[in-house]
Amino acid sequence: MRLLLMGAPGSGKGTQATAISKRYGIPAISTGNMFRAAVASGTALGHQVSELLAAGLLVPDVVTDQVVAERLVEPDAVDGWLLDGYPRTLGQVSALQACMAHHGVALDGVLAIIVPTEELLKRLLLRADIEDRADDTAETITRRLAVYHEQTEPVIEQYAASGFVVRVDGVGSVAEVATRIATVLDPLTESAV
Ligand code: AMP
């Protein structure tokens, strides 16, 4: 099964990606996690992206597309994957399409977790208190939400235009949202696995 998980910062996408990964036995591939790991281990990629991450700005498509293309050919991703946080721009949509066409594979679904902006702000400010993420300051939170609105919502609209997007209400407990997602994905697994 090959899925995209879309959602604003603070929508709970990372948490739900982990749950989906376990339930369906596919790797959850998070570009945000890959970039944070690169920064933490001080690789060349990490040096390249650290300021952008800290500022809440997107890493250029050319860099992000390559990171994803390389990840998708690793052995654990051959039979399926869940992309968490990619594609985030229309350019990335084209790159992913080209990558998938090259490998002769297709998407099974696009899931968008929907959470109202006031709730996102509340969650992100709370997370800033709990985790020590460089991009969870009030200023970068506002910027990341604006970037999402400007660059990533058009991605959801584009997939929606091809009838691909299932929107899931992201307000509620982690378990409640996970159940909503499973209700959508369980029927897909029968045809896709
Ligand atoms: P996330 O954990 O998904 O919120 O991502 C954290 C940060 O990583 C983002 O604010 C961006 O700086 C960077 N990032 C993650 N995914 C992408 C992407 N698909 N395109 C560009 N930048 C990304």
Image (cartoon, rainbow, N blue to C red):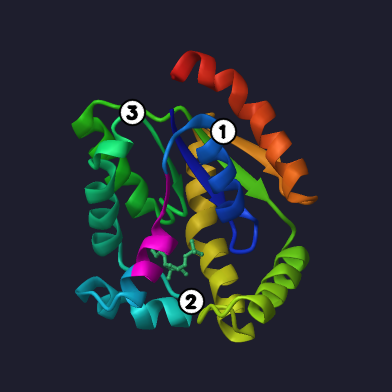
Against 61, is 58 above or below?
below
Residue 24: x percent and y percent?
A: 51, 30
Label 1, ligand 1: CB separation under 8 Å: no
Question: Label 2: which residue?
Answer: 56
Q: Earlier in the sequence, mark 3 or mark 1?
A: 1
At x 28% / y 32%, what residue is drawn? 78
Q: Are there few (<14), some (14-19), or many (20+) residues within 10 Å of tag 1?
A: few
Decide whether the magenta segment is chiefly helix, strand or loop: helix
Which residues are the magenta region? Answer: 28-37
Q: Amino acid at mark 1?
A: Arg
Pointer 1 with pointer 2, Cβ within 8 A: no
Q: Which residue is mark 3?
A: 79
Residue plotted at (54% across, 21% down): 188
- The secondary element bearing badge 3 is classed as loop
Marks 1 and 2, how far apart in space?
Answer: 31 Å
Residue tagged by mark 1? 23
Q: Is residue 35 magenta?
A: yes
